[in-house]
Image (cartoon, helix red, strand yellow):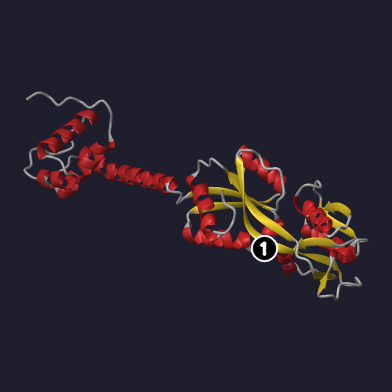
Amino acid sequence: MAAPKSPRNFELRHLRYFIALVEEKNFERAAARLGIAQPGLSQQILNLEALVGLPLLDRTKRSVQLTLSGQLLFDQARKIVAQADFALSELQRVGRGQSGKISIGYVASAAYSGVLTESLSSFRAEFPEIELQLVEIEMRQQLAKIEEGELDFGYIRPPASVPIGLATSTVLREPMVVAMPQGHPLASHHAVDLTALADQTFITPRQPADVGFHSNTLEACAATGVIPKVSPIGRDFTTIMSMVAVGLGISLVPKSLQCLQLPGIRYVELSRAHMTDLAIAYRKNEGSAAVRAFIAHHRARYPRSDFR
């Protein structure tokens, strides 16, 4: 009988065949378990022995018994196959968006609104093995980093200039209120018209006039015929509220910011509604299955938003 031809490459199937044979202790049962013909299994075992250059079975025995080298290979083969199966399973989970990592930027007002925490909590309940990395960051930087691939997703307060490769979708529209010092003459009112605040200094985040709450403030005032004095000096809303509390001005803020109860601040509704949006930003052609799952999660959670 001619010696079996040695296979060119060591293949995982050789180890699977060998493991099945050892566990079943019978060529016929092992072949049936593997779904192959018994002669084919015998040939594969001969190929494996030719590849390792050592006998794996004691052929002086009628039953399947291992040589010392066969026992060593069997112990290692189970570890190798288990690791390979685990790696394949993980790859498939990543491909289905069930594991992986998502880096998320957000503006602080997204957290105050509840959208950030609610969205992330419900997503983690559905995809517990996906790692979520959060960083609070100004929205123009968010958009640049998403475009460059340094971030995957962002929560922003429009308007802002959006790079061509990105999409934005509104997930929350809420009214604005005015934050004023508790000693302000209008602080005890239930609602106030912006025309009554025409002589006030409006404090906004440190942004250009066409961006975020600076733009929101100008638009709301323009709608009521007010030409405001704007001081865009606040780094964030916590800083702005501190400025308001000491009497440096007033500020238009999202209604959800009322959860930020600082001493010396009163939130008063506007008699004419002026709205502000919270939106998400992401790449139009996203390659990560995990990020695509995150986008789809928002589509399902906010079905009336302007997803495109």
Q: Is residue 279 left or right of residue 7?
A: right
Q: Residues within 10 Å of mark 1 (few under 14, many from 20)?
A: some
**Residue 246 can be seen, yes or no:** no
Nearest the viewer among 109 and 21 is 109
The residue tagged 1 is 113
Q: Is residue 15 left or right of residue 304?
A: left
Name which residue lies at 58% across and 63% down: 118
> Looking at the image, how many numbered discs can be counted on the residues?
1
Nearest the viewer among 155 and 48 is 155
x and y percentages locating residue 283 in the rendered image: 58, 43
Residue type at mark 1: give it. Answer: Ser
Vertical placement of 45 versus 93: above or below? above
**Residue 126 can be seen, yes or no:** yes
x and y percentages locating residue 284 in the rendered image: 56, 42
Q: Is residue 137 left or right of residue 42?
A: right
Q: Quadrant of residue 259?
A: bottom right
Q: Quadrant of the N terminus?
A: top left
Name which residue lies at 14% across and 33% down: 43
x and y percentages locating residue 46 in the rendered image: 16, 32
Task: Identify the residue at the far right of this view.
Answer: 199
Vertical placement of 173 versus 47: above or below? below
Nearest the viewer among 94 and 201 is 201
Which element carries disc 1, helix, strand or loop? helix
x and y percentages locating residue 154 in the rendered image: 63, 50
Name which residue lies at 17% across and 35% down: 45
